[in-house]
Amino acid sequence: MLPLFGCSSIDFEYPRPESYVPIDATQSQLGAELAALVASRTDDLSGFYPLPDGIDALSARIVMARRAEKTLDVQYYLIYDDIIGRAFVRELLHAADRGVRVRVLLDDIITVGLDEGLVLVDSHPNIEVRLFNPFRRGAFGRPGSALTEFGRINRRMHNKSFTADNSVTIVGGRNIANEYFSATDKLHFGDFDVVGIGPVVQEVSTSFDAYWNHESAIPVPAVIRSDADTDEGMTGLRERLDQSYQAILDSPYAEAVKVRVGDYMGENAGRYVWAPHRFVADHPDKAVKAKAAGASSMLGPLVESMKSAERKLVLVSPYFVPTDAGIDMFVDLAGRGVEVTIITNSLAANNQITVHGAYARSRKPLLEAGVAIHEVRRDATMMGAQYTQSEATKTTLHTKGFIVDEREFFIGSFNFDPRSAYLNTELGVIIYDPELARTYARMVDQFLPERTYTVFLDDGKLRWRTLKDGETVVLDKEPNTSWGQRFLAKLIGWLPLEKQL
């Protein structure tokens, strides 16, 4: 049985055999196809294809899972037990059934209620699941961990990557859940991933191996004790996954996925843009408090890139909490004549009111320096959302990226806040290509007028301006919020929580 009471310990000495990606990707048909394509390019170029649309983002993952022959490496902050999560796990099981080695590295922050499923998936002979920085189990496990090991469990793995046969990878902001792929009529996350082929794949794989073999990545049996019949349980799990999959096959969403599933690795390889890049990732030691100070960090390269702006910097961050140093950087850029634009969530769109409370303090100094601020409306329409959109849908920005002078852009898991900078581990890629940068910039420009509020100062007071049905509307309070929400956000903004956000 799974532990229900007490506070079970974690066996940090549990055997953890090291494993690595196969260097010779050409051992699979997928790898051979892509190797031939990559060979026609110079060694400094990787191929990239952006995935701003949730339907495309799911389609690409499905294609990769189904074409994999050797390995699938899965690294995520969360995988929910919902339509998307179950479909995703179903694809992993089917790949493992074909003999594909599947490694799943999952942060343990949002796994409540998933222990039985984790044990069952891990029981497959071709799948191993490891939990990053796990909590103790039992009724008092999580509270106990928080009380006695806060320095450890406060540091989370926020990385997001999905790699097939060490030949093609997806990195970006999406976790595995309905809202990231426009598969729900209640909440849509506007997000962005990028498919990568070429040298960038080995860099992602090397990073994955470093995390997989790290002391913080603990095998499921060392965390979750179970004497359940896994054969019987696996049969039941497969039935539940098949039932969930069958339930959506005839839905408009499923039809859209069928139509949009393209061969991102074969016939349509010409859609890739080939460009130099810089893969950036935190070292997993950042997740260990005693080692964090000496761990290599991606913060430096990101700041370096942003500071290099000469004409224009556009930063997109759902959770935007600039420290004093961050405010100074943006103020300095604006003072040098750089057009600085910040895009983040409005209070109504933000799913983290604590973050908004801390961010709100930065608005006036940034606006006074000439920085433009746009806050996403909760009724904004995101790409792919048309398949399930309803009046009840709430939109939250979740994309993390920036564009520098329309010559380079970053996409990844990094929020511009202290938690991403100093506590969580993150990854992403800076792509040096004007074509992709301009494409992303055009998307942003088209998005702003009717999907965001432009925040500005009127006689020193904050105001919000937007277009509704072609008419300009100006508001003097945080849009679409109650007095209670505004008061709570302001109260939180007074608390010394910034370093945890």
Image (tube, rainbow, N blue to C red):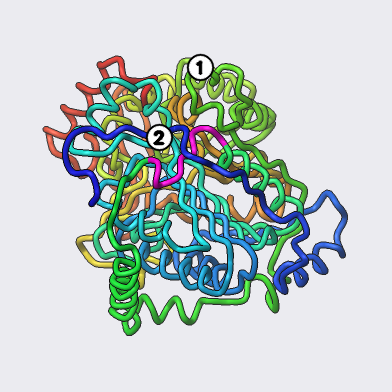
In which quadrant of the rendered image does the C terminus lie? top left
Residue at image location 60% in from the left, 23% down from the top: 295
The residue where tag 2 is placed is 11
**Which residue occupies the foreground of this view, 197 or 475?**
197
Q: Based on the displayed image, in which of its 4 quarters is residue 164 positioned?
A: bottom right
In this rendering, does residue 473 appear at all? yes
Residue 290 — which label? 1
The boundaries of the magenta stretch are 214-222
Residue 444, image x and y in percent? 51, 51
Q: Based on the displayed image, in which of its 4 quarters is residue 224 positioned?
A: top left
Q: Is residue 417 left or right of residue 49?
A: left
**Which residue occupies the foreground of this view, 177 or 232?**
232
Residue at image location 26% in from the left, 16% down from the top: 495
Residue 385 — which label? none
Residue 85, image x and y in percent? 37, 62
Tell me the kind of residue under disc 2.
Asp
- Counting residues from the start of the chain, the first of labels 2 and 1 encountered is 2
Which callout, 2 or 1, points to the residue nearer the camera? 2
- In the image, is residue 339 part of the stretch drawn in magenta? no
Tell me the kind of residue under disc 1.
Ala
**Marks 2 and 1, how far apart in space?**
20 Å
- Within 10 Å of disc 1 (Cα), the crowding (few <14, some 14-19, many 20+) is few
